[in-house]
Image: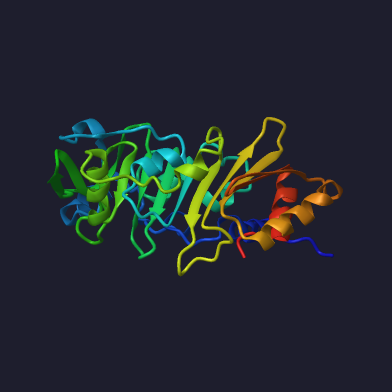
Amino acid sequence: MKRKDPATKNQKYLAIFLAVTMLLSAGMIYFTGDLDRDKENDVSSSETGDVPIMVSFFQIQGKHVQHDFNSIADGLKMSPEGVTNAIYVDLQKTEGTPLEAVFGNKQTMNVSFSYGADVTKRYGASYGNESGFELHMIPEQRFNMPLNAQAMPYDGYNILDRTNGTYNIWNVVGSPSIIGPIQAVTRVINVLEGNETSDTEYDNILSQADLKGCIYQQVNKKTNSSEIPAEQYYRDLKKLDDGSYVQTSIFLNLESEVNEKIKAYQANSSERGVSYNLTTMGDITKLVISSDFESVYNESSLLNINK
């Protein structure tokens, strides 16, 4: 049998691995522009406002975001209620893994968003109605902004118009920075300031997860437009020091036929070189699969949990 091209296999793996179309994986926000234009071009085009300028966060007046940002749980604590799916990626950990081709790394994020600075962590939340926002960790605390970008004061923060009014994309600087449509950004600020409630719907399944050291983490829930075999679903992936991978899936009220399917594959998993650990605690089912990356990919394909 002819082996699939690695790039093709990684793309297929993404479809199985993520299961939902999200602003993070689909690339909702991408900016164009060459950040390496020469000085002469900068001067000639600066009158149009097309050329970005590097701005230090310290130059931005008003409040800056200061919030823990080391897991999907931290992102959800900044997210208004109603998140239908969310994903968190540590872009420092994608480097050298097959997921680098899917999510990129801290340098490719720099180019994709025309920041002029590396992005080390990324979170995206979706609300099922084509709305959402992202959080980006930028350790250099600076990025490129359109020349003469407008700022809108809001509850002590300055929300920056990222695209000079061309699109509805705005930034709030800090650790992490917020990026998204103005309506979404103001709601995140409302959460930070205690004027709106954060999303706690996934706390139950997240309490069963080890949130440290993950390459990526995902949560989603069953809606009219989603097809998952549980009310809620969490998944993460870790790379161990020996080069193997551990994939954890946690379900709230998993469908019985899917649970039986998992048990059936668990029975002869050692023949495929995969280790299973399946536990049930009330309405929570937790499945941990470990092996090399390709075997984890193959097992996900066999289980096809995301239908």
Q: Front-most of 109 and 265?
A: 265
Q: Position of residue 135 (x, y in %)?
A: 36, 44
Q: Is residue 74 left or right of residue 104?
A: left
Q: Is residue 88 left or right of residue 131?
A: right
Q: Front-most of 75 and 123?
A: 75
Q: Is residue 2 left or right of residue 116?
A: right
| Placement of 111 over or under 118, stated as above or below | below
State which quadrant residue 1 falls in: bottom right
**Residue 260 visible (yes or no):** yes
Task: Count up the numbered dots.
Answer: 0
Q: Residue at x 25, y 61 (%)?
A: 167
| Placement of 235 over or under 139, stated as above or below | below
**Residue 304 visible (yes or no):** no
Q: Position of residue 257 (x, y in %)?
A: 68, 63
Residue farthest to the bottom, as pictured? 224
Q: Residue at x 33, y 42 (%)?
A: 78
State which quadrant residue 165 falls in: bottom left
Q: Residue at x 33, y 51 (%)?
A: 81
Q: Front-most of 198 and 126?
A: 198
Q: Quadrant of the C terminus?
A: bottom right
